[in-house]
Amino acid sequence: MQRGFSLVELLIVLSLTSFLAVSSSIWFISIAKLVRAQQLQIESNEVGRFITSYLTKSFARAGLGLIDEPPLEFEGDVIKVRYQSRLSVVGDVRNCLGNKSKTSVIEDHFLIEEYGYGGLELKCISGGLGDWLTEGVYDLNFQVAVDRGRFVDDQFQLGAFDGIPDGYVESQNFVPQSMRAVALKVNLSTYRPLELSTFNVGYWDEEPSKGSVAHDFTTLVLLPNG
Amino acid sequence: MLRCRGLSLIELLVALVLISITVLGTVRLQVASQGQLDYALYSGQALELIEETSRRIHLNYPNHLDYQVTNLERVKPFKCDPCSPADLVKLDLTHLSQNLFAVLPDASASIFKCKDQMCMAVAWAGESFKNCHNTKFCIERALL
């Protein structure tokens, strides 16, 4: 004679199964969150490394082949980098968008601005065209290592450039007419939002919100032609 | 007559141990993965700091020997304008110290002369640069 399960047995099995299902769900959700946070860290780190490496390459060209024009200029939040478009040794030099220039001097503009999804992007404008390089930039500012003169017997002689910086000035205080830029300190903050806004799906907040992943990067770019 | 027997206590315990091992293994995997991720980030930051130090010394090369520091500590902000080459050394070390403690947890660093060049060791996560060859959380590189 075969007997089925009693109601009590069924209830016990049901409650045990429910308990297991709930605990494994919580466990899976927490692991999924951790994986997501790790992914954001990787992305934020990647954005930071990409931008610092990209700007290092771009800024190192400032002043290449130029004689009279200032290699660097700061106008508000825009940094302008100038260099010759054709050099006898390497031929055509491409601008920050990867295009050849029709003019003899290339002027690349770098800025961060809000883009369609609410966050901030690093943008490059050159030769009348512009394109975004990457999103997820929270802050980007520069300090310029300037050479304004030299020290002789503890006396500072203004205008006698020696290639050794005699201070760092904020980019907005940089005057290309009276200072030589020998290096540029790049301070960059990147972030990735942990969760997208509930009300604007796909839109980013302008600043890192609670739970988002942010990283600070700093690098010093030498300007051999500054 | 067909007799149905339930699971024995031993069988249940074995199942429980196996499930626990699986859960603990997954948790440990996640923790290790997070550790590797942090390591990748911090070692990148440490290398960037070493590169920055190298560039700063390159800019002030006549005074490169003055950059030697046994233990780069937290220092008060230093200002100079215009900065003499000696002041620039102090200013650079101040900036480097600020960067070091801003980007790396429990960090320590040293700039020293090694053979004919300058070297830098950067340690983090509570490790000491003195023990750089025996720990994963330390990087030592030649600067010039």
Image: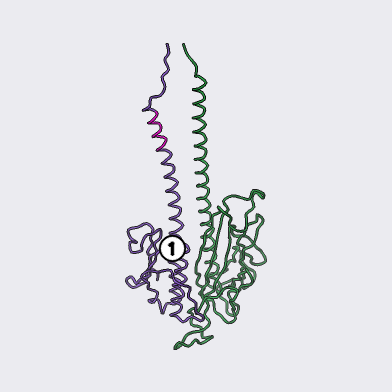
Chain colours: A green, B purple
Residue located at (59% from left, 49% from top): A195
Image mark count:
1
Q: In this view, does B111 lie above or below B13?
A: below
**Magenta highlight on residue A166:** no
Nearest to the observer: residue A134 or residue A96: A134
Q: In this view, does B139 lie above or below A198?
A: below
x then y, percent, for residue B77 = 48, 73
Residue farthest toward the front in the current orientation of the protein = A8
Nearest to the observer: residue A52 or residue A210: A210
Q: How crowded is mark 1: few (under 14 residues within 10 Å), some or many (20 or more)?
A: some
x then y, percent, for residue A106 = 61, 70
Q: In which quarter of the image is the C terminus of chain A?
A: bottom right
Nearest to the observer: residue B21 or residue A75: B21
Disc 1 marks which amino acid?
Leu
- Residue A225 in sight from this viewpoint: no
- Residue A207 in sight from this viewpoint: yes
Residue located at (48% from left, 82% from top): A162
x then y, percent, for residue A186 = 53, 68
Residue where numbered disc 1 is placed:
B47
SS type, badge 1: helix
Residue located at (37% from left, 73% from top): B68
Query: Mark 1 — on which chain does it sit?
Result: B
x then y, percent, for residue A147 = 52, 80
**Magenta highlight on residue B14:** yes
Q: Magenta segment, principal secondary structure? A: helix
Q: Tell me the magenta residue range.
A: B12-20
Answer with left or right where residue A128 lies relative to residue A147. Answer: right
Q: Is residue A128 above or below residue B88?
A: above
